[in-house]
Amino acid sequence: MEIIDKRNSLPTHPSKRYRRRSLSAIKNIAIHHSATTSGSAESFARYHVNTLEWPGIAYHYVVDKDGTISLCHDLEVVSYHVGNSNYRAVGICMVGDFRTQQLTEAQKTATQNLVLSLLDVLTVDIDDVWGHQEFPGYEWKPCPSINMGNFRSELFARGDRGELPIYRSVSYSSGPRTRTYLSYGDQGDDIKALQERLEILGFKPGVIDGIFGKVTEDAVKRFQRAANLSVDGIVGPETRDALKRYDQDVPLIELASPTDVDTDDGGLYELESRRTLRLLSPYMRGEDIRDVQEKIGAVADGIFGPATAEAVRRYQRRKGLVSDGIVGPRTWQALDQNDTGGVPYSRLIFLTNPYIQGRDVKRVQRALNISEDGIFGPITDQAVRNFQRRERLNIDGIVGPNTWSRLFG
Ligand SMILES: [Zn+2]
């Protein structure tokens, strides 16, 4: 019998962990159906972790309709599947809704094989193999919606025929390999899991559709900036690891919002997501390069050639940065500090209901040295008034052309 080992590949909660027990604490095997017409260990794990915020998937094993068995936890893990009986039970979930669907022969055989192999290593008898509904307090629950009496009779019959020892030989495979690098254009379950994780962390990756598009790429880049990783929009081992560990309680208001909330400017993703600029062959081109060139006093042709690289190096030396001629996160940060970061003056911003939001608000907040949430609320209003007072401007709390140019001039 072959079992796919998914113990290290399924989504888990970033901080919560299930308790553990000794094997001798196990007194029952609990049989479940998923109560969904389809599904997989991966999709159940995502639901249990992302939506229910459990430490991990509920079940120790998931048996697909075609009889494929996935191992999800060590037997010692006390996962959540039968309430008060969790501590004493191992959970096996058969994919399907057996209120309306039929248990397939392959699935039934695989589940029975699995149970027989477990009876061999646990101090549990066939009489201790219970449907979810047979556990105390769950009489109301239509799970697994198969006849457990028949299920046990068949197990007894197979045990009598001496089939038990066969299941001493269980082999494990690692299952489908997970891709090491995920990037723009990729599709699949792993992309969906990535999007769900970004969503949970507040990075708003767009529609959770399993497609690594522009919005997801932007979310990855914003995450990488927030996590102080190199910002390339590619999810490799470092980014994957950071995604796993990232503490979602850290306030990330600026980086968490999609960068297009305040404008219909189509080029904004490129601006805000901050690709790393450097001398490459062929030369990199773009508005962001033109923007940098203007700031560092190079010819603003939007092409990153040797002269631009040299100008970047000069700028970096002036700012006390490593002068490598590469515009990475540190250099971007320096370029941002005392200017609008490429955000043009475009409108009056002031305290109104609902609050005005946008990148221009963030830049104003940065210039005023207050918390940058991009929302023009009372605190921003007060800070603007204070600034206007200091600068002997008209004290109206409105950032119009005069206040704007004084802030950034
Ligand atoms: Zn159940």
Image (spheres, rainbow, N blue to C red):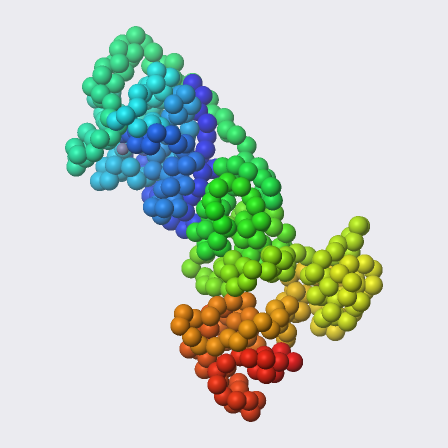
Point out residue 399 in the picture as x, y percentages from the top left corner: 53, 79
Point out residue 142 in the picture as x, y percentages from the top left corner: 22, 31
Residue at image location 64% in from the left, 74% down from the top: 339
Q: Quadrant of the C terminus?
A: bottom right
Residue at image location 54% in from the left, 46% down from the top: 240
Q: Quadrant of ligand 1?
A: top left
Question: For the view shown, which residue lies furthest in the top direction?
Answer: 161
Image quarter of residue 279: bottom right
Point out residue 375 in the picture as x, y percentages from the top left corner: 46, 70
* Above or below: residue 386 compared with residue 197: below
In this rendered view, identify the residue nearer to me: 148 or 300. Answer: 300
Going by the image, does 28 lie left or right of 206? left
In this rendered view, identify the residue nearer to me: 210 or 324. Answer: 210
Question: For the view shown, which residue lies furthest in the right direction?
Answer: 307
* Above or below: residue 312 compared with residue 80: below
* Above or below: residue 367 compared with residue 311: below
